[in-house]
Image (cartoon, helix red, strand yellow):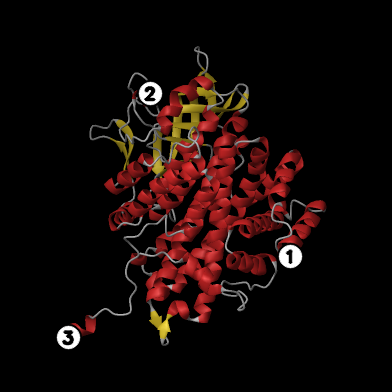
Amino acid sequence: MAAGTHTVTNQAPPLVGYDMFATDQALAEAVARHLPPEEAEEARAELSAFGVAAGSAQVQEWGRLANEHPPRLRTHDRYGHRIDEVEFHPAWHRLLGRAVGAGLTGAWGRPGGHVRRAAGFLLASQVEAGHGCPLSMTHAAVPALRAEPELAAAWEPLIASRVYERELRPPLEKTGVLLGMGMTEKQGGSDVRANTTRAEPLAAAGEYVLTGHKWFCSAPMSDAFLVLAQAPGGLSCLLVPRVLPDGTRNAFALQRLKDKLGNRSNASAEVEFDGSTWARLVGEEGRGVRTIIGMVAATRLDCVLGSAALMRQAVAQAVHHASYRSAFGGPLVDKPLMRNVLADLALESEAATVLGMRLAAAYDSDTEEERALLRIAVPVAKYWVTKRCTPVVAEALECLGGNGYVEESGLPRLLRESPLNSLWEGAGNVQALDVLRALRREPAALNAFLTEVGRARGADHRLDRAIRDMLAELADLEGIEARARRLAERMARVLQGALLVRWAPPEVADAFCASRLGGDWGAAFGTLPHTLDLASVVARARPEA
């Protein structure tokens, strides 16, 4: 066959060798906006170094290898002894070690720590989303552990450590630890109060043994887990270490690993507790949900950030491809219809990033008003942003045509990953009902939400009208539960619009308000009004390799 038939032309180069942080204008601006100048300068330097590594060919290859070589369960050693271990590809450990070393498990005691960590989490999740699970749960365990000051004092420094120790040893003898969580059971799912795992008290105060199972336990090689179990006083939160202080293994039997749609680099296990599984009470008996809810809220925010990361990477790949690919007489990116599609996708991506980073900043502020805002804005954002992820990734894949449908493009991996964050830590109905719960029980939450969106009032007539319509919806309680999804969506879009009107370039805010709030938008991406400045929106989203 003639060699000339294999000459490669009109193909986009790989999107590697670029600063993933600095080329994401929405993210870089959010970091600068939410940090004091002296902290922002240091954060930019750290995140740019992390972003350069994330955009490198080597780290991208680690992401591919971790995904293509999923973890393997080893229940027994060669002699028949139970060992209950999971083997990961070396690339998984490299990614996890790099993320821990960048401080992605330590945010709670550092000035601006949540904003800095959220930005880093957005970058790490674009390389390979699977290793974000242990990072998220470890970071999020801190609020729950603080219900027991003695435990928090011992564990927090190890959680915030930048040392990744993969070996299983007594946790308090290590220089860095990872934590997981076990709530879901076969018979209950999201209804954790239906859990049947039992916690029976031992003679020593605060010590228990567990009998039962957990249907989903992600990252089962973590050093310890926060679980819910039925103690004599009711559903309680307990800390279950993998290795006991004397060096022996706790009874933590891994039954099997889930064969999942996506998130394949991360192990998700079914776990059995055999009646001798040792655990330590966290908080008070019977107050397990209240104790662990701080962990749940923090992981829900990571669902928002994780979805924003997937959207950003998908849009970056689509814009990059269209910038280099020629068709019908010129670059795809210059074709009016393709530009419309790319701009529409870029709007969704930027809105998700700006909202996620605003909520991270609320954690850093830690005032009563900001805590009230988080109570309602986190489930609102979790509901809507995670739902927008799959259609955004699917449309971005289509922008690459047949190339996007091929595994080597990386877009199929993003697409398989895209539904996960909508399921994890409570699916859509759970989030929408949680919004109603906050509205009914916590008036300060709605007040904080209305104050936040009110800061943009008067800047755009479409936003003002959307706020009025939202207030009318809130005032009508007839059939409110059946309308919970509709309400959560409306609140999310109003909040995103308010943030973009305040902080995004005029062309971005104008396009968002015209389409998402003004009603000049079709049912598919690529239906923005043609009179908008779409070229500027697309140019802003372009990653410069």
Label 1: which secondary element: helix
| Mark 2 residue element | helix
Instruction: Decide: few, some or many residues near mark 2? Use Cα within 10 Å; few <14, some 14-19, many ≥20.
Output: some
- Residue drawn at x 57%, y 39% as measured from the top left: 363
Type of residue at label 2?
Leu
What is the number of the mark on residue 461? 1
Distance from label 3 to label 1 (Cα)?
63 Å
Q: Which residue appears farthest toward the front when viewing the image?
A: 38
Q: Secondary structure at mark 3?
A: loop
Q: Position of residue 124 (x, y in %)?
A: 40, 50
**Figure quadrant of the N terminus:** bottom left
Q: Nearer the viewer, mark 1 or mark 2?
A: 1
Observer-nearest residue: 277 or 507? 507
Label for residue 2? 3
- 445 or 79, nearer to the observer: 445
- Residue 404: give x, y in percent of width and height: 40, 70
Quarter of the rendering containing residue 249: top left
Relative depth, front residue between 443 and 256: 443
Q: Is residue 347 above or below residue 358?
A: below
Closer to the camera: disc 3 or disc 1? 1
User: Which residue type does callout 1 highlight?
Assistant: His
Q: Which residue is mark 2?
A: 172
